[in-house]
Image: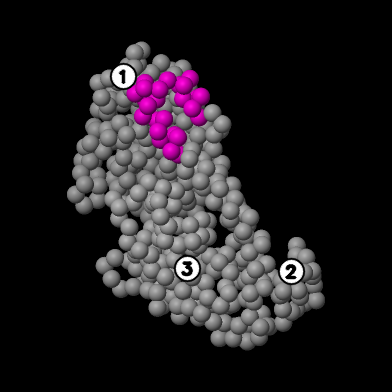
Amino acid sequence: MGSEIPRGWQSRTVDEIAAHAPRAIAIGPFGSRMKADCYAAHGVPVIRGNNISDTKALVGEFVFISEEKADELASCTVYDGDLVFPHRGLIGEVGLLAGTNGRYMLSTSLMKLTPNRRVAAPAFLFYYFRSPSGRHELLKNASQVGTPGIATPLTSLRSIRVPVPPMAEQESIAHLLGALDDKIDLNRRTNETLESIARAIFKSWFVDFDPVRAKAEGRQPAGMGAETAALFPASWEDTPLGPVPAGWGVSPLGDVCEFAYGRALREDDRRPGAVPVFGSNGQVGWHDTSLVRGPGVVVGRKGNPGVVTWADADFFPIDTTFYLLPRNHASLFWLFHLLESLGLQLLGSDSAVPGLNRGMAYMSEVIAPSVAAQRAFDRLAAPPRFTVSQKEREIRTLAEIRDALLPKLLSGEIRIRDAEKLVGTHL
């Protein structure tokens, strides 16, 4: 942290703002004390580095240890209001337990801070460590040789200096930034729901064949109008993949789509614009010129092979990707969900850099529904898909606002009242 802080603020070390309680600053257990064979089906959740997100929310799947094991490792327990920091691997990240009930456990790669809440608001500290200054403090003693790590993690954490505004200002800053994060999390949860609905319809129609089963048994397919139901057969035919709806058949994936190569576009060569640039794990930036007319589907080729991403407008897939060209009138929405379901990540090439073997992917056998059934699926899948894309754009805007405000609020360049005006209608 620089020497300049706003008038009325203080500069204190983490050691000075920690709670006056045993183990307010602590490190996770040694690996020998919590191996993978300690994990249980339920019990006390263990926070790992992959549970830390870019907002206050903890994400992903948790592993658990028994209540008895958690009692044995009591010094590594974390509660609501505690901050967690990786000291190995994802150094520079920070997580906050906010609105949680009960106890959690640190993994072997994390350390924690329980702040003195009369001095420092947990959420304010979280946002400080998310700022460029705070991240710099977390990284400055890290070694990048091999797996990134901090040689003396607790000593380094205790010595970090943080800005400490008056409590009312801390809470106002945390509230404003937290409101942006809350909106981001709400949008993400909404998108997860919309995406799960589309996946459920795809599975029902084209994996479980529920409409066909219903008609074969003389029943009306549930939740489906007569016009749509008429697009599904009422009988089966035998294939190498087993019984499939009559008339649909089995074909190689290469018969319904082509995997076209993306084009090299280095980050330094990208020009400011509104065209999304996609890499093997999703969007990686922006450019002013597109390579492909959207909507479209991008498939990871190198680095993150088999990851499937939707692009709702014109886009630029770089050379670590394939982009999809439908064949034989195949529906793009059907293909998107089909590829998600195929487990393309398993079709890797034998090389130093993980890659998707296009030839092997083409040979994958798939059940190809009638084009009419695919188009009916389009009509249901398109509206939620475009809503997801709209909310993803809003997430990016909110994150940009949050990340731009964060250092300015912490340096005093923008005061909270002015920041609230700038956020305005975005909340």
The label shown at residue 5 is 1
Circle nearer the N terminus (2, 3): 2
Residue 51 appearing in the image: yes
Which mark is nearer the camera, 2 or 1?
Answer: 2
Question: Do we see residue 79 in this rendering?
Answer: no
Quote the CA–CA distance across marks 2 and 1. Answer: 65 Å
Q: Which residue is mark 3?
A: 324
Q: Residue at point 29% right, 65% down?
A: 353
Task: Count neighbours of disc 3 (C-alpha within 10 A) and say few if under 14, some if 14 to 19, many if 20 or more.
Answer: some
The answer to if 129 sits in the magenta stretch is no
> For numbered disc 3, what is the local secondary structure?
strand
Residue 274, image x, y percentages: 44, 48
Task: Locate residue 259: give its quadrant.
Answer: bottom left
Distance from disc 1 to disc 3, alpha carbons, whole Å, reads 52 Å
Tally of marks: 3
Q: Going 58% across and 74% down the picture, which residue do you hit?
A: 329
**Earlier residue among tags 1 and 3:** 1
| Contact (Cβ within 8 Å) of mark 2 with mark 3 | no
Q: Which residue is mark 2?
A: 228
| Rendered location of residue 416, percent (x, y) | 45, 21
Q: Which stretch appears magenta? A: 399-423
Q: Nearer the viewer, mark 2 or mark 3?
A: 3
Secondary structure predominantly adopted by residues drawn in magenta: helix
Q: Secondary structure at mark 1?
A: loop
Compare marks 2 and 1 and give the one earlier in the sequence.
Answer: 1
Q: Amino acid at mark 2?
A: Thr
Query: At which x and y percent is residue 209?
Result: 66, 73
Graded by Cα atoms within 10 Å as few (under 14), some (14 to 19) or many (20 or more), the crowding at tag 2 reads some
Identify whether 396 is placed above or below 297: above
Amino acid type indicated by mark 3: Leu
